[in-house]
Amino acid sequence: MEKISDFYRWYDEPDFISVKINKSYSDDLIKRAIKKSKTIENLSKTIRISKATIHNYKNGTSMNIKGLKTILDFLDIKYDRINHRIEKIGWDNINLKINLKSNEMAIILAASLADGHLNQSHFMYKNKNLELINRIKDCVKKTFGDVKIIDKVDKNGTSYILCTSFVKRQLERLGSPKGKKLFHNPSIPEVIKKGTKMQKKLFIQQFFDDEGWPEVENRRVACSQSADTTSILPKKFISQLVLKEKYSVNKILSNLRSKIVKPNLLLDIQNLLKEDFGINTRLNLKRIARYKWGENKDYVSAVWELSCARKEGVKKFERDISFFSSNKRAILKEIIKEKLVPDDIFFRLLNIAIKLQREKHYFRVKDMQKYLDLERGRIRKRLTTLTRQKILYNEGGKYQLRLHI
């Protein structure tokens, strides 16, 4: 007998789901059941299935899950011994030999925990990047077989796909939650944590493709995720938050900051990046905001950012993880290119500062960038040095010369 997956269990599907098994095997099952009961009438009474239905089964008509289990129970046949005989579940030509350790499964799981969504009947994946949409479609087909995938476009023109409930159920069993992920605060599924290095790489890559970005200004890569932090905040504090207004870290009481709930996905990704790829990252709270959920419930969402900003770490990320999106991948390659800082950078900055001071009375980093072929992060670093030396004065990103000109 062919080796079958120990993951997919057709017998856990709802009783009403149709299941089609190999016709010759179906015929053999019914013959054995009738032989055991002596007559088809006795079989019908014993298993409580009508004679007409039994005849239909014998002629190759699809059964439902309940009917197949009933016949197997009567013949003392274990459910998982017939996986290789099953041809269809519901309307899908599904693959029952699902490989949990496949690269495609890692990608689909990451998508379901990032830009994807599980509802009552579908796995939905939405992205403006058609490269990523097509990637998920290909992975679903390769992993689950000839399942139904519906292409849609929302009112804003963003493409998305709906995958059959069969795919949704498997992802849910593996640890991708149904409904709003913010309230569940899911972790990386165990199949990924215990998987191969390639699985971990592809999971992280897809997650960054969905929820992350390469940032040219500060020469770093980062991704973000939210977590519901309502339960740890005092009701009085929550009531003072204006709906939908975003509050930065310095607006949060110092005794509460350390208690704000962190997203388990980011904690797990941070751990995998460190242990499996030697990439150090930082996890920082960016802001909180109060929102309405339903008619009576308010909740507070905490947005966290996982970032890799050290030059060595960004290079490792580009080499060992990177992005699947060709656009983001190109930006990342640009970030890791070495751009030499001129030896006379401070003299150039002062000359530009004098020019901008006369024109605008102040200047920002982006103003400097118009005259220098350098990333904002590198310019800001030198301006910070000049500020410490009390040559410049900085107020909220607006710089002024302390010198009288």
Image (cartoon, rainbow, N blue to C red):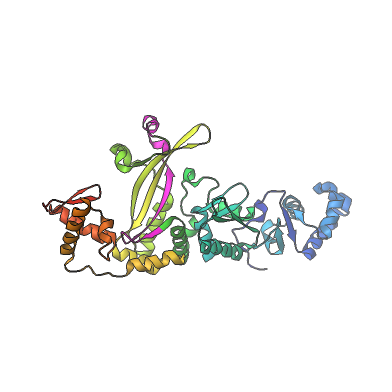
Nearer to us in this view, 336 or 11: 336
> Looking at this rendering, what residue extends furthest in the front direction?
359
Q: Position of residue 1 (x, y in %)?
A: 68, 68
Nearer to us in this view, 118 or 40: 118
In this rendering, would 176 be left or right of 16?
A: left
Identify which residue is drawn at 27% across, 66% down.
373
Nearer to us in this view, 355 or 10: 355
The range drawn in magenta is: 213-241
Identify which residue is drawn at 73% across, 50% down.
66
- Vertical arrangement, residue 251 with respect to residue 239, above or below: below
In this rendering, would 328 be left or right of 397?
A: right
Q: Position of residue 272 (x, y in %)?
A: 40, 59
Residue 385, quarter of the rendered image: bottom left
Identify which residue is drawn at 46% across, 51% down.
187
How many tags in the picture?
A: 0
- Vertical arrangement, residue 338 with respect to residue 41, above or below: below
Query: Does any portion of residue 101 appear in the rendered image?
Result: no
Residue 322, quarter of the rendered image: bottom left
> Looking at this rendering, what residue extends furthest in the top direction?
236
Q: Position of residue 274 (x, y in %)?
A: 35, 60
Nearer to us in this view, 276 or 249: 249
Query: Does any portion of residue 111 appear in the rendered image?
Result: yes
In this rendering, would 241 be left or right of 115?
A: left
- Vertical arrangement, residue 201 with respect to residue 117, above or below: below
Answer whether residue 92 is magenta in the image. Answer: no
Answer whether residue 240 is magenta in the image. Answer: yes
Identify which residue is drawn at 17% across, 57% down.
354
Q: Position of residue 175 (x, y in %)?
A: 52, 52
